Image (spheres, rainbow, N blue to C red):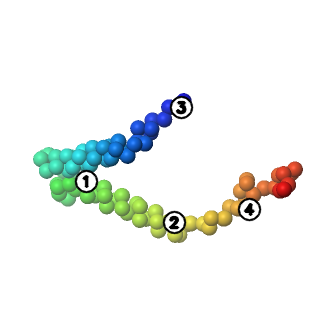
Amino acid sequence: MRFNPFIFFEKASRLRALLVAFLILCFCLFAIDFFVKRYVYFEIESTYNFYSIYGFIMFSIIIFGSRLLRLLLGRQENFYAKKAVDSEDYPGMEEK
C-alpha cells in the first residue's frame, strides 16, 4: 500500500475542520494587527491591515492579469496537433 499524505482530506468533515481552523487563524491574525505597534518606512504602511489588503489586491491583479494574458497568448486546442507524438503514424499499427 502506497503512502498518500492527502488521504486525511478524503472525509468532508476533516476538510471542513481544517478550513474552519484556517479561518480562525486568519481572523486572529487580522485582530492582532490592531494591537501591534508598527515601525514603518512609508506612511501608508501604518494603515491597519495594510498588508492583508495590499496582498489581496495584488493577488487579484495577478489572477485577472493572467486571464487577460490567456486571451492574448492563448492557442487553439489543436495548435500542436501536427507535431504531437500521439498524432504520428506507427508502422504495423493499422486500425482494425
Reading the image, the residue beneath label 3 is 2
The answer to whether one can see residue 95 in this image is yes
Between the C-alphas of marks 2 and 4, the distance is 22 Å
Say which mark, if any, is on residue 82.
4
Task: State the SS at label 2.
Answer: helix
Q: Where is residue 81 in the image (x, y as percent from the top left)?
A: 70, 62
Of 10 and 43, the residue lying toward us: 10
Report the residue at 73% width, 53% height from top.
Answer: 85
First reached walking from the N terminus: tag 3 or tag 4: 3
- The image position of residue 95, as x and y in percent, is 83, 56
Residue 38 visible in the picture: no
Residue 55 versus residue 5 in the image, above or below: below
Give the mark, 2 or 4, whose residue is nearer the N terminus: 2
Three-letter residue code for mark 4: Lys
How far apart are the two marked residues, 1 and 3, measured between alpha carbons? Answer: 41 Å
Residue 70 image label:
2
How far apart are labels 1 and 4 at the CA level? Answer: 48 Å
- Viewer-nearest of discs 1 and 3: 3
Disc on res. 25? none
Nearest to viewer (mark 1 / mark 4): 4
Q: Residue at x 68, y 61 (%)?
A: 80
- Choose the circle earlier in sequence order: 3 or 2: 3
Q: Earlier in the sequence, mark 1 or mark 4?
A: 1
The amino acid type of the residue labelled 1 equals Tyr
> CA–CA distance between discs 3 and 4?
38 Å
User: Marks 1 and 2: in contact by CB < 8 Å?
Assistant: no
Label 1 with label 4: CB-CB less than 8 Å: no
Q: Name the residue tied to disc 1.
A: 51
Of mark 1 and mark 3, the one earlier in the sequence is: 3
